[in-house]
Amino acid sequence: MRYDTRAERAKLRAVKTFISLAILLASPVLLVAGAPIRRRYLSHVYRDDAPQILDKERGQASTHYFVVTHPLLGWLCWPTETLARLIGRRG
């Protein structure tokens, strides 16, 4: 995606910064219950009647796109996802 004006790039940078701060603030909760929270969030974002998170034709990306693809969210949800997978295999 291409953001031509300085204002568009500043908005994008602000959104990414706020997402990082929100994930860091929620990190204790994500470490304890990250897998169910992330699963519900992804099912909400990818439901049938939801708008696209990435629209290449119009050159727009939703805020959800940056949340879903943020590596910090994956790292913080990894312990509970691994634990849930282990319990699922044994149970």
Image (cartoon, grey):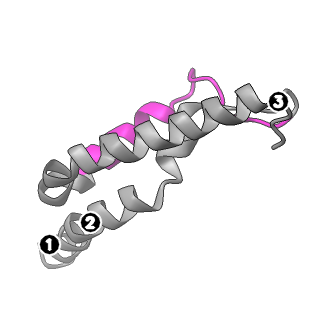
- Please state which amino acid type lies under the numbered disc 2: Glu
The mark that comes first in sequence, 2 or 3, is: 3
Is residue 8 visible in this depiction of the protein? yes
Which disc, if any, is residue 5? 3
Q: Residue at 21% of width from left, 45% of height from top? A: 26
Q: Quadrant of residue 22?
A: top left
Q: Residue at 30% of width from left, 68% of height from top? A: 78
Q: Is residue 39 left or right of residue 65?
A: left
Residue 13 appears at what percent x and percent y? Answer: 59, 40
The residue where tag 1 is placed is 87
Of all residues, the one furthest to the front in this rendering is 6
The residue where tag 2 is placed is 81
Relative to 67, residue 10 above or below: above
Residue 43 appears at what percent x and percent y? Answer: 42, 38
Residue 24 in magenta?
A: no
Q: Quadrant of residue 25?
A: top left
Marks 3 and 1, how far apart at CA? 50 Å
Front one among 22 and 29: 22
Relative to 87, residue 45 above or below: above
- Please state which amino acid type lies under the numbered disc 3: Thr
- Please state which amino acid type lies under the numbered disc 1: Ile
Q: Which residues are magenta?
A: 36-56
Residue 43 in magenta?
A: yes
Q: Residues within 10 Å of mark 3 (few under 14, many from 20)?
A: few
State the SS at label 1: helix
Q: Quadrant of residue 12?
A: top right
Q: Residues within 10 Å of mark 1 (few under 14, many from 20)?
A: few
